[in-house]
């Protein structure tokens, strides 16, 4: 436990001097320091609170003031208290009235006849801490709202049971093309393509069996325009305004997916080219090498030379066809007359013509 002494500014609204002295005595021997400020009437109290010159941690309020009393007094003090916790100290023993006053914004309701130093001290400490927790929660909600709505990434919140959208940020509206009203009238099924709904329902059934399981991965979504996109889903469970929900980041990875598909198609083409090179190119190339070696090593008559030149021309044409097929697969511009085997073909044809 911390030994640091806390200091509290307490506004005591009390027209009975004896009751004020009693409060002062009850708090003077406590572990924390209490600075008491005393007002006697509603008018005086309102002037201090509206002036805003002094900030109070707690207001101790008597319900029988000379110029105002009862529930009307409570409502008007609550309205000008700037969310300062209000502890009612009263002689009223009406339980129903006490409950009603608590529902009007009062932090605590203590009967004066039952007041003790410890009960008063605890009420002040607890009321102050509740206020701090409420302010921290409010600040947390504000930060969540700013993080959610100002995020450049598309984000939405949907109810886990109905799949209805509960909230959506501007980035998501801009990306999907809907207005806020339109998006919030949809549910998760409405942005999934029809062909994926069967798989979607299967996943949904799995989620019902495993309610704490997160949906992570890449899914297909539809924009308002009907454009199909791939989104990388990151989601987590939250309680949104008392409703079990999921907050989801939907990052568009369509370009990445298309790039991967292009790489896969290119790899497929490269495999086909590799097969062509290893099987179809080798046969005519081997024949050409063999025929060239025969021409170099052995003397032949004109008829035999003509026959071998015909074989060379056939093999050259086969190589030309293979190279053209490779060119088509790789989408490279036509080699035309610059291609080596076109040159070889031309030489062969000239030999035949001679």
Image (cartoon, grey):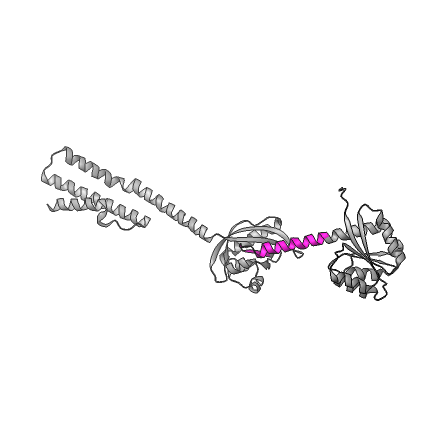
Q: Is residue 104 visible?
A: no
Question: In front: 70, or 318?
Answer: 70
* Residue farthest along the front direction in this orientation: 53
Q: Residue at x 15, y 40 (%)?
A: 308
Q: Position of residue 2 (x, y in %)?
A: 75, 42
Horizontal placement of 236 versus 319: left or right? right
Relative to 17, residue 217 above or below: above
Q: Is residue 214 visible?
A: yes
Question: In front: 98, or 189?
Answer: 98
Horizontal placement of 129 versus 167: left or right? right
Residue 150 painted magenta = yes
Residue 34 painted magenta = no
Quarter of the view holding residue 86: bottom right
Horizontal placement of 196 versus 341: left or right? right
Quarter of the view holding residue 286: top left
Q: Position of residue 116 (x, y in %)?
A: 87, 51
Q: Which residues are magenta?
A: 132-157
């Amino acid at each position: 436990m911390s030994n640091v002494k806390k200091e509290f500014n307490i506004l005591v609204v009390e027209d009975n001097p004896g009751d004020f002295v009693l409060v002062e005595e009850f708090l003077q021997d406590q572990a924390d320091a209490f600075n008491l400020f005393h007002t006697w009437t509603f008018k005086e109290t309102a002037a201090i609170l509206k002036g805003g010159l002094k900030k109070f941690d707690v207001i101790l309020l008597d319900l029988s003031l000379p110029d105002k009393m009862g529930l009307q007094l409570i409502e008007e003090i609550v309205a000008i208290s700037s969310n300062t916790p209000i502890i009612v100290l009263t002689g009223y023993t009406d339980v129903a009235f006490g409950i009603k006053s608590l529902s009007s914004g009062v932090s605590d309701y203590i009967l004066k006849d039952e007041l003790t130093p410890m009960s008063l001290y605890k009420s002040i400490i607890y009321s102050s801490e509740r206020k701090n927790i409420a302010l921290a929660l409010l600040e947390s909600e504000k930060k969540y709202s700013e993080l959610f709505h100002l995020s450049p990434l598309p984000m939405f919140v949907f109810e886990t049971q109905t799949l209805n959208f509960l909230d959506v940020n501007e980035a998501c509206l801009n990306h999907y093309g809907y207005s806020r009203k339109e998006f919030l009238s949809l549910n998760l099924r409405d942005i999934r393509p029809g062909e994926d709904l069967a798989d979607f329902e299967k996943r949904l059934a799995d989620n019902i069996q495993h309610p704490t399981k997160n949906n992570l991965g890449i899914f297909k979504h539809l924009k308002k325009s009907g454009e199909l996109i791939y989104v990388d889903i990151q989601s987590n469970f939250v309680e949104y305004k008392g409703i079990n929900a999921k907050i989801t980041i939907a990052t568009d990875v369509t370009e990445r997916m298309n790039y991967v598909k292009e790489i896969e198609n290119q790899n497929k083409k490269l495999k086909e080219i590799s097969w062509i090179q290893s099987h179809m190119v080798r046969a005519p190339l081997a024949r050409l090498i063999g025929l060239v070696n025969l021409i170099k090593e052995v003397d032949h008559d004109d008829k035999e030379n003509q026959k071998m030149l015909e074989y060379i021309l056939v093999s050259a044409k086969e190589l030309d066809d293979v190279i053209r097929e490779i060119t088509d697969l790789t989408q490279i511009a036509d080699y035309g007359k610059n291609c080596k085997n076109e040159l070889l073909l031309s030489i062969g044809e000239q030999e035949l013509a001679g």
